[in-house]
Amino acid sequence: MIVSRWGLPSPSSQQALTRWPTDFSRDITPIPCHSHNDYWRKVPLYDALAAGCTGVEADVWLDPLKPNELRVGHTRKDLTAARTLKSLYIDPLLTILENQNTPANVTVDALNNTMKVGVFNSSPNTSLTLLIDLKTSSKETFPVVLKLLQPLLEAGYLTTWTRDRGLIRGPITVVCTDYIEFKSILSPENSSPRIIFFDAPLPALSSLTPTPQDLQYNSNNSYYTSVSFDVEIGKPWLGMMTPGQVVKVRQQIQGAKERGLVSRYWDTPSWPVRAKEGVWRVLEREGVGMLSVDDLVGVKGAWEKGLKSLDLLR
């Protein structure tokens, strides 16, 4: 209903969300799919959640006129003042999680720590991955991302890591990619606690001759580990992956699992449908952590037709 009512004149769509019932996701089954270029959808974030996606992606650009704001879009010409990381993702997520975490839903663990629930009623411990794709320099953009995430951190909704307590899963796991420097992830500003994790290069995790940097990536500093399917694996032959391609995928996915990271291939085939769904099935069978997709309707339908469920909490 959120998606179908979006954009109706009165009350405004954004205002309507603040009164949304706590069980808005009760009929949604989460699946390990990542909504690639999510901001292009008719209703960013909510289209992905309605399909059951457990990951969404936003390309962000530093606004030269408003240095504390990040605009969302694929290229600079797509940017508008109304489409920001705060308005499209952070504020809506805060609203959803505030509605989800009513006194009746919140529990405590053995140490009397409050356990926050996530966006999916059917799987309250599933963490939604927010992939923030930096399109402007890490040095200038990363501090703004940290600042904008503070409301989610203060509310206890973020996955965090500290040297004393280790990794603590939260309803939202934030990952940065593209123009992000690994040293920013390890910086003191992001270490007490660490709230942003790295998108590690997937080929590095299965290298037979790893460099010292390759060995640094682990679940303390990274979450996703990704690569372009088209560049790294290549196009399927006559709509089917070759044995050599399958072996390479298997080795890379296993390398990710050994580090405790979530493997993800972007730029998978989109056409024909036989090739697209064939690659999805091979990736699922080999244990990929997340399917990166543009076709939300297609992946939901394929999942319901036979792609078996993965362990969303691994």
Image: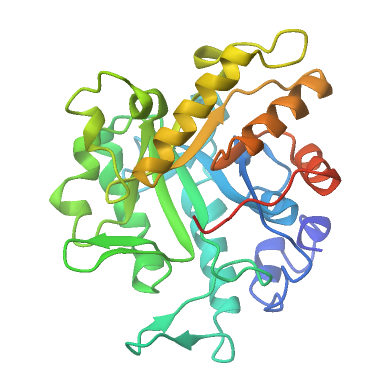
Q: Does 180 sit above or below residue 7? A: above
Q: Quadrant of residue 101?
A: bottom right
Residue 221, image x, y percentages? 28, 47
**Foreground of the two, 4 or 298:** 298
Residue 46, image x, y percentages? 68, 55
Residue 117, image x, y percentages? 53, 74
Left-right relation of 203 to 240: left
Residue placed furthest toward the top:
237
Left-right relation of 114 to 221: right
Residue at (63%, 23%) from the top-left corner? 268
Count of numbered badges drawn on the protein: 0
**Foreground of the two, 70 or 47:** 47
Q: Quadrant of residue 19?
A: bottom right
Residue at (19%, 55%) from the top-left corner? 191
**Foreground of the two, 241 or 268:** 241
**Foreground of the two, 191 or 258:** 258
Quarter in which the N terminus is drawn: bottom right
Whether residue 162 is visible, yes or no, is: yes
Q: Does 95 sit above or below residue 174? A: below
Left-right relation of 275 to 232: right
Residue at (53%, 25%) from the top-left corner? 249
Q: Does 285 sit above or below residue 8? A: above
Residue 159, image x, y percentages? 38, 61
Q: Quadrant of residue 38?
A: top right
Left-right relation of 241 to 225: right
Residue placed furthest toward the left:
188
Give the colour scheme shown. rainbow
Whether residue 61 is visible, yes or no, is: no
Residue at (29%, 44%) from the top-left corner? 218
